[in-house]
Image: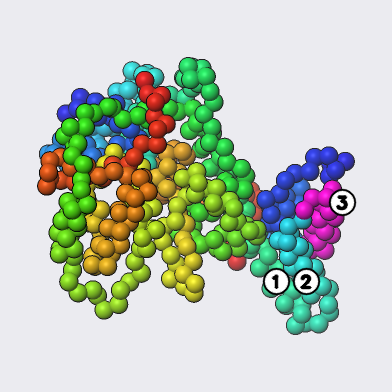
Amino acid sequence: MEYGIKLEIFEGPMDLLLHLIQKNDLDIYDIPISKITSEYVAYLDIMKYLNLEVAGDFLVMAATLMKIKSRMLLPSHDNDEEGDELKKELVNRILEYKKFKEASKILHTNLESRKDIFSRNTEPEFKEDDFGVEVTIFNLLDAFRTVLEKAKKTPKEIIKEECTVEEKIKLILFELETRRFLAFFSLFSEDETKRSVIVTFMALLELLKTGDISVKQDKSFGEIRIYRKEKGTNEKNN
Amino acid sequence: MKKIIEALLFVSQGPLKVEEIQGVLEVNSAEEITAVIKELKNEYSSRQSPIEIIELAGGWQMATKKEFASYIKKMYKRETTIKLSNSALETLAIIAYKQPVTRSEIEAIRGVESSGVIRTLIEKNIVRICGKKDTVGSPVLYGTTQQFLVYFGLKSADDLPSLEEIAIEEEGNELSEGEN
């Protein structure tokens, strides 16, 4: 009855294993393999019986369990050790999984308690005239040239892994999440080589093209700032 | 200076970083500003203000206290929820603790295919791609976002309780053998 009616949803084979261990009050450090294997397989049977799709991952674990079980049943010394080894590995995996399972519960509690705390989520309205000048592509290119000249002339012997344009785009958007605007030059503050300066600049152009950002300037040839385009969901202020 | 900081905290959207305040005040040291914020925080709590100043995601923010949640929800006539499934939370926990981490590392722990969950977390802006691992195939590395800290009320990514602590709390008296 417990099986048929209240079938808990398991996130995966590890989740199921942990559940079986806890339900049967088994010693996690010394799992009785044959018991857990039959419980596990029985569970898979029920899932099949209920026409639930049994994901391949569940079957892989079933195979692992059976392998350990068979190794441990064989009398030979070598195999005996192998069985122990496999079992230990499984125990470690379960323990590792359990840690994160617990951590996820803590996160859940955090999320729940945070839910009831509110803060402002709109910016005050400002007149845009101080940074109202639309930036032309030429202004951008001028600024870009300045940065490029500042970038180190020679790359280090081996260019270390650098961001791709896509990653840089994500990074810029990420920065803009918490700030109203970014100064043009601050975008390049971490770019040491010409290559990375170019990547950053390309990311900027791409974002302009997709309309995710806009660039403004305080006066012609003044400081350039990058703003995130509003998505039109901010009407509910005040 | 305290008044200025209070005003800045009031208007700020999202956690206000000490450096941002420093940028406005131009003179004061970060320590000094932090001290003033803490003083403000104490003032608010000692006069039992409905608003508190909390440390969050590397900055400070004014926020309403929990007990007023029901009224606020009533005003907006809606529930505020970021719903995350168990598998999303589980995956997020792995990413939060092991970041930067690849998908296969996540899957090794969960024992289950995880690309869909990861995508959901990215769409919700809780997880981001934070680089590529320097191994064969250079797989993408995942990490948590600033928004993650805000949603979960954390000061920084290090603000999570340590996994060891969690394990100990959980195990309780059950056992104390080392883990090999």
Q: Earlier in the sequence, mark 2 or mark 1?
A: 2
Q: Which residue does the numbered mark 2 point to in the structure image? A: A67
Disc 2 marks a residue whose amino acid type is Lys
Disc 3 marks a residue whose amino acid type is Tyr
Q: Which residue does the numbered mark 1 point to in the structure image? A: A86
Q: Earlier in the sequence, mark 3 or mark 1?
A: 3
In depth, the one of B6 and A175 nearer the eye is A175
Quarter assignment of residue A164: bottom left
Q: Are marks 3 and 2 in contact (CB under 8 Å)?
A: no
Quarter assignment of residue B148: top left
Q: Is residue A63 shown in magenta? A: no
Quarter placement of the N terminus of chain A: top right
Residue interval drawn in magenta: A32-53
Q: Are marks 2 and 1 in contact (CB under 8 Å)?
A: yes
What secondary structure is marked by label 3? helix
Distance (Cα) linking label 3 and label 2:
24 Å
Neighbourhood count class around disc 2 (C-alpha, 10 Å): few under 14, some 14–19, many 20 upward: some
Question: x, y (%) of residue B169?
Answer: 57, 46
Regarding residue A129, the answer to whether it shows in the image is yes
* Chain letter, disc 1 residue: A
* Chain letter, disc 3 residue: A
What secondary structure is marked by label 2? helix
- In the rendered structure, the answer to whether residue B124 lies left or right of residue A155 reads right
In depth, the one of A185 and B130 nearer the eye is A185
Front disc: 2 or 1: 2
